[in-house]
Amino acid sequence: MFTGLIEATGTVRARGPVAGGQRLTIETPLAAELALGDSVATSGVCLTVVARDATTWSADVSPETLRVTALGGLAEGDEVNLERPLAIGSRLGGHFVQGHVDGTGRVDAVLPEGEFYRVRISFPPQLAAYFIEKGSVAVDGISLTVAALAASTFDVQIIPHTWTATTLRHAQPGTIVNLECDMVGKYVLRSLSLGTARS
């Protein structure tokens, strides 16, 4: 379980095939604090540390994860957002993020507003029911608030710190991002659908 508060960014240093999937090697100062088997949210995708040294760590990415997330488009030199799991007793500053991406979205516009930025993201139709205005969404693992909602797009407002401390500073129209909808909303809709099916 994660919070969507990004600890650091990392840089993809290598990517190669392994048994149908891919192995990513990421350089980051967090590498020295990781252990084999640790979970790390990588641009919102929960990955497992399978190798590490003082400056890099590696994870194997399954074919399914490559299909449904933006990780399949990563290349050497690209940056990713990184967050370690929530520790018991820690303050929850963002929202509950599982690291289980629901789908990808596309950045449609990046609009400067003084020192802030407004980012408009389009999403696939099957995710529409999970968004509410002023609700939570994880974009590339970042806990954000839906500032405006339309039929197939939502806007998020990015504060200067988040802009400079995450990969969002590289966003431009056409950028593909990972989306994880609020877990609470997914449980509510599932419960309602089962109730409808029984009646």
Image: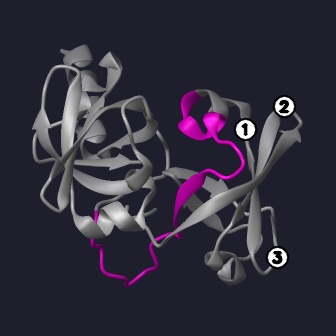
Q: Residue at x 60, y 64 (%)?
A: 10
Determine which residue is flagged by label 2.
20
Q: Given this view, does label 3 or label 2 mark the residue nearer the observer?
A: 3
Vertical arrangement, residue 17 with respect to residue 108, above or below: below
How much space separates mark 1 and mark 2, taking CA atoms? 7 Å
How much space separates mark 3 and mark 2, taking CA atoms? 25 Å
Find numbered disc 3 in the image and state the secondary structure of the residue it sits on: loop
Q: Residue at x 42, y 61 (%)?
A: 166
Q: Residue at x 39, y 31 (%)?
A: 105
Left-right relation of 179 to 154 = right
Q: Amino acid at mark 3?
A: Asp
The answer to whether any part of residue 5 appears in the image is no
Snapshot quadrant of residue 172: top left
Dot 2 crowding, Cα within 10 Å, few <14, some 14–19, many 20+ = few
Q: Nearer the viewer, residue 88 or 69?
A: 69
How much space separates mark 3 and mark 1, taking CA atoms? 22 Å
Q: Over which residues does the magenta segment extend? A: 68-94
Disc number for residue 62: 1
Q: Amino acid at mark 2?
A: Gly
Residue 68 x, y percent position in the rendering? 56, 29
Q: Are marks 3 and 2 in contact (CB under 8 Å)?
A: no
Q: Are marks 1 and 2 in contact (CB under 8 Å)?
A: yes
Vertical arrangement, residue 199 with respect to residue 132, above or below: above
Dot 3 crowding, Cα within 10 Å, few <14, some 14–19, many 20+ = few
Residue 191 x, y percent position in the rendering? 25, 33
Vertical arrangement, residue 170 with respect to residue 5, above or below: above
Determine which residue is flagged by label 3.
53
Magenta span has 88? yes
Disc number for residue 50: none
Mark 1 vs 2, N-terminal side: 2
Dot 1 crowding, Cα within 10 Å, few <14, some 14–19, many 20+ = some
Mark 3 vs 1, N-terminal side: 3
